[in-house]
Amino acid sequence: MRGLEDKTVLVTGSGRGIGRSIARRLAEEGATVAVNDIDEANARETADIIADEGGDSLTAIADVTDFEAMQTTVRDIAEAEGLDVIVNNAGWDRIEWFLDQDPDVWDDLIDLNLKGQMNGSRAAAEHFVETGTSGTIINISSDAARVGSSGEAVYAGAKGGVISFTKTLARELARNDVNCNVVAPGPADTPLTREMRETDLGEKILGGMTGQVPLGRMAEPEDIAGAVAFFASEDASFVTGQVLSVSGGLTMTD
Ligand SMILES: NC(=O)c1ccc[n+]([C@@H]2O[C@H](COP(=O)([O-])OP(=O)(O)OC[C@H]3O[C@@H](n4cnc5c(N)ncnc54)[C@H](O)[C@@H]3O)[C@@H](O)[C@H]2O)c1
């Protein structure tokens, strides 16, 4: 065990996909997990799975794009269980050429993928600083942010923002003993990517990318959960402002 037994962790967007795997993994390591999603039925399903696996959880239904809702959510969880770690995982993408993409979609992509992570980070950081909790913020970005990715221009821009935002937060919050790190997944097999592969362009780009992965497959959500579990654990207590790519070696740049 790596110091998660007495911790409470909020995982946004944990009703399915990578977030669900993160929630299950952290519960398996002994944390109490607050399962956030905008989709209540899926959040409850994650909580039921955790209960079946012998873990502890609660559901926290909220839209991460709503800052006040995230503040209330964090306050409620903190009052009930305390709060030590937030994993800002909720995100969304659609593969389209930049020149074909309706600018209205840019707002959706930025609101969820960048501002959603800011909302969760700010709400959790306020709690950590006010209560003197040595907290942890883990933001889920994407390898698209590190190296660019055709068909994902605005998404990559938002996820790039997550990286520079998190590094800055790591500097500002170090004095409060709050660590901030980023996990950047490469292509992972989730409900989202299955939906993205329903278009010809999505299949062409995601299929092509998967074929280039040195380790020979898409990530499974559990692969991403392992990296998050490291950042959430005591093993990472001297690690802050860092980005860990989990991509089977697809990208090897710094
Ligand atoms: N799957 C991949 O290949 C991949 C690669 C790189 C990065 N990522 C990132 O990993 C994260 C998880 O992706 P996934 O593939 O598991 O996606 P997914 O769509 O399968 O799951 C995302 C979850 O977030 C929830 N959600 C969406 N909007 C929300 C909101 N406003 N408030 C609260 N919850 C909301 C959804 O209901 C869903 O349960 C995202 O940030 C994504 O950008 C995924």
Image (cartoon, helix red, strand yellow):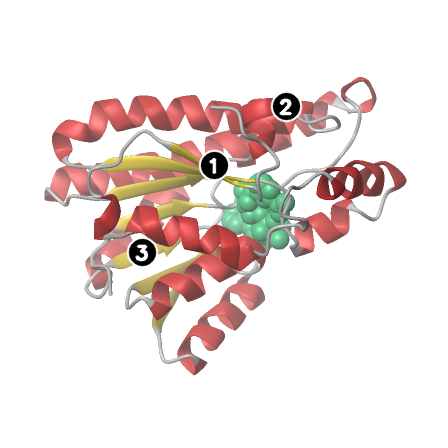
> Viewer-nearest of labels 1 and 3?
3
The percent position of residue 56, horizontal first and vertical second, equals 33, 73
The percent position of residue 132, horizontal first and vertical second, equals 10, 42
The percent position of residue 170, horizontal first and vertical second, equals 27, 28
* Residue placed under numbered mark 2 in the picture: 148
Q: Quadrant of the N terminus?
A: bottom left
Going by the numbered disc 3, the residue's amino acid type is: Val
Of the residues under marks 3 and 2, which one precedes in the sequence? Answer: 3
Residue 60 seen anywhere in this rendered image of the structure = no
Does the beta carbon at disc 1 come under 8 Å from ligand 1? Answer: yes
Q: Residue at x 24, y 53 (%)?
A: 83
Query: Quick check: 100 above or below 7?
Result: above
Query: Quick check: 67 above or below 81?
Result: above
Question: Which residue ends up furthest to the front in the rendered image?
Answer: 214
Which mark identifies residue 116? 1
* Residue placed under numbered mark 3 in the picture: 9
Q: Residue at x 59, y 23 (%)?
A: 147
Going by the numbered disc 2, the residue's amino acid type is: Gly
SS at circle 2: loop
Question: Quarter-wise, where is residue 128 in the image?
Answer: top left
Of the residues under marks 1 and 2, which one precedes in the sequence? Answer: 1
SS at circle 1: helix
Query: Quick check: 136 above or below 57?
Result: above
Q: Residue at x 54, y 34 (%)?
A: 113
Q: Is residue 234 left or right of residue 102?
A: left
Q: Is residue 127 left or right of residue 209?
A: left
